[in-house]
Image (spheres, helix red, strand yellow):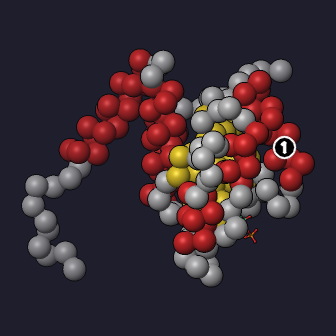
Amino acid sequence: MAAAPPVAVIMGSQSDWATMRHAAETLDALGVPYEARIVSAHRTPDRLVAFAKGAKAAGFRVVIAGAGGAAHLPGMAAAMTPLPVFGVPVESKALSGQDSLLSIVQMPAGIPVGTLAIGRAGAVNAALLAAAVLALTDEALAERLDAWRAHQSAAVAEHPDTSAP
Ligand code: RP5
């Protein structure tokens, strides 16, 4: 069986894709292969165990995990894999993602989850962090990451458009 791509983008529900697609698009822009999967800590616990326990052997090197509400997915995945796990709090309807953020960020000492911002910003930054980890041992990717940042800097105007609303 072929080795897995370096990044796994997992999410608790199809409804998380609207947020997690921003991680996927950022990885696409950087030329980082990934696999996106729905893995729910609550609804598909056996799938979570199989994924997390097998992730390193499968060939993944970094896990990005997005979930909302009582967001146990990133922490449970981190408990079962030695790979770095970056957690993305999805903006929930009831509490605007505050619930997601707190349940992902407040890991007890011993099992880390690198927690990002709520929503799109967190998804984009999780992808950038995953790329930065991989770039430590991939010079071509390091150059693409530098170029991505330079392009971002170049796109920022020196002065605001005062005709804008
Ligand atoms: C979590 O429950 C998922 O990560 C999702 O953010 C949230 C709501 O899921 P759905 O009811 O939309 O499937 O497990």
The answer to whether 78 appears left or right of 24 in the picture is right
Q: Can you see residue 59?
A: yes
Give the residue drawn at x 51%, y 43%.
Answer: 127
Give the residue drawn at x 86%, y 47%.
Answer: 47
In the rendered view, tell whether residue 70 sits above or below residue 50: below
User: Mark 1 — residue?
Assistant: 49
> Residue 26, image x and y in percent?
48, 44
> Residue 57, image x and y in percent?
77, 24
Location of the C terminus (image quadrant): bottom left
Give the residue drawn at x 42%, y 19%.
Answer: 140
Task: Please name whichever residue, 136 or 19, is drawn nearer the observer in this view of the structure.
Answer: 136
In the rendered view, tell whether residue 70 sits above or below residue 147: below
> Residue 151, image x and y in percent?
28, 40
The answer to whether 97 appears left or right of 117 in the picture is right
> Which image quadrant shows ligand 1?
bottom right
Q: Residue furthest right?
A: 46
Asked which quadrant contains residue 52, the reply is top right
Amino acid on which disc 1 is placed? Val
Task: Please name whichever residue, 42 or 152, is drawn nearer the observer in this view of the structure.
Answer: 42
Asked which quadrant contains residue 84, the reply is top right
Task: Please name whichever residue, 50 or 22, is drawn nearer the observer in this view of the structure.
Answer: 50
